[in-house]
Amino acid sequence: MKEQTYILKNKNSFNLVHIFECGQCFRWNRDSNGIYKGVVGNSVLSAQETAGSIIFKGIVGANIVHPGHKNSLESVVKEYFNLDTDYTIIKRNLSKIDQFLKTSIEYGNGIRILKQDIWECIISFIISANNNIPRIKKTIEKLCKTYGKAITWGNDTYYTFPTPEELSKASIEDLRSLGLGFRDKRVYDTTKMILNKEIDIELLKNIADVNMIREELMKLPGVGEKVADCILLFGFNRFEVFPVDVWVRRVMNDLYVKNSDETKVSKEELQNLAKSKYGKLAGLAQQYLFYWRRSS
């Protein structure tokens, strides 16, 4: 595979740190030169921010996981980073809602929701339950190294995220040895269900009703409401979904609800509040607020 280069000259609403450090993905790592490297489907990419552009380099696999990818780095970048979505308009509309959201958008102005593979999202966010990001990344990397395909680029070897067929070769004990902990059986059973089409990812893509998709996803072991909402937002790109975790509950309570005991603020209350304030852009509002509060 030949190395390719693609240069994104319009850096508006595009910041690598904001995109990769906002908690939506786990397979991108930053080196000592500030260059991020990651695996997208069967492709390996690097991304470097300069004064006036983003420089992407990489090799693009022949067997493309994401439909629509042609064998060009430009095609991979445009789809994965969702470059057809105009974040300038989105941020302008959200900033009008209140000063809190305006401040969070100014802080994380370069956030973009990635178009991630749904299968990878499902397994990754099952692994993320009651876990921290360094450990999540380490576990997923072990999973890929053990069951994915190796790709050599330069002097380094990278690994694709294993397909359901590849991951089905792992026993519960095998998964436990990779550090999945109590999530081992959940990943094992979920893999079997998806492989057997008990939950058909391709069919879910065609369902308009987000609640119906959520109900189907929650049939998978280890997929509760929060994990399902993360899959919907980061895999299905359903921007109206508002995942609630400890940080989101905290910021929403601090800014709007003001309950002296934030643990007593229910997900339903926060999601109804988000729906009324942010509408179909609730998921994007969540990302700005989450990144702002957690980082600052």
Image (cartoon, rainbow, N blue to C red):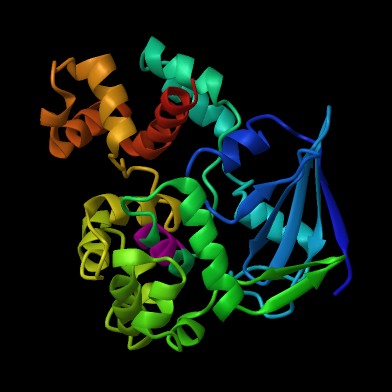
Q: Quadrant of the N terminus?
A: bottom right
Q: Is the magenta stretch mostly helix, strand or loop?
A: helix
Q: Let me know if residue 117 is in the magenta part.
A: no
* Percent of width and height locating residue 246: 28, 35
Residue appearing at x 73%, y 32% in the figure: 11
Quick one: which residue is furthest to the front in this view? 177
Seen in the picture, residue 172 relative to 28 is either above or below; the reply is below
Q: Can residue 24 be seen in this view?
A: no
Q: Nearer the viewer, residue 280 or 289?
A: 289
Q: Which quadrant of the figure has residue 32?
A: top right
Residue appearing at x 74%, y 74% in the figure: 151
The magenta stretch is 121-126
Quick one: which residue is furthest to the top in this view? 99
Relative horizontal placement of residue 146, taking residue 293 as reference (left or right): right
* Percent of width and height locating residue 18: 59, 34
Q: Is residue 135 visible?
A: yes
Seen in the picture, residue 25 relative to 261 is either above or below; the reply is below
Seen in the picture, residue 230 relative to 274 is either above or below; the reply is below
Q: Nearer the viewer, residue 198 or 156?
A: 156
Residue appearing at x 20%, y 28% in the figure: 273
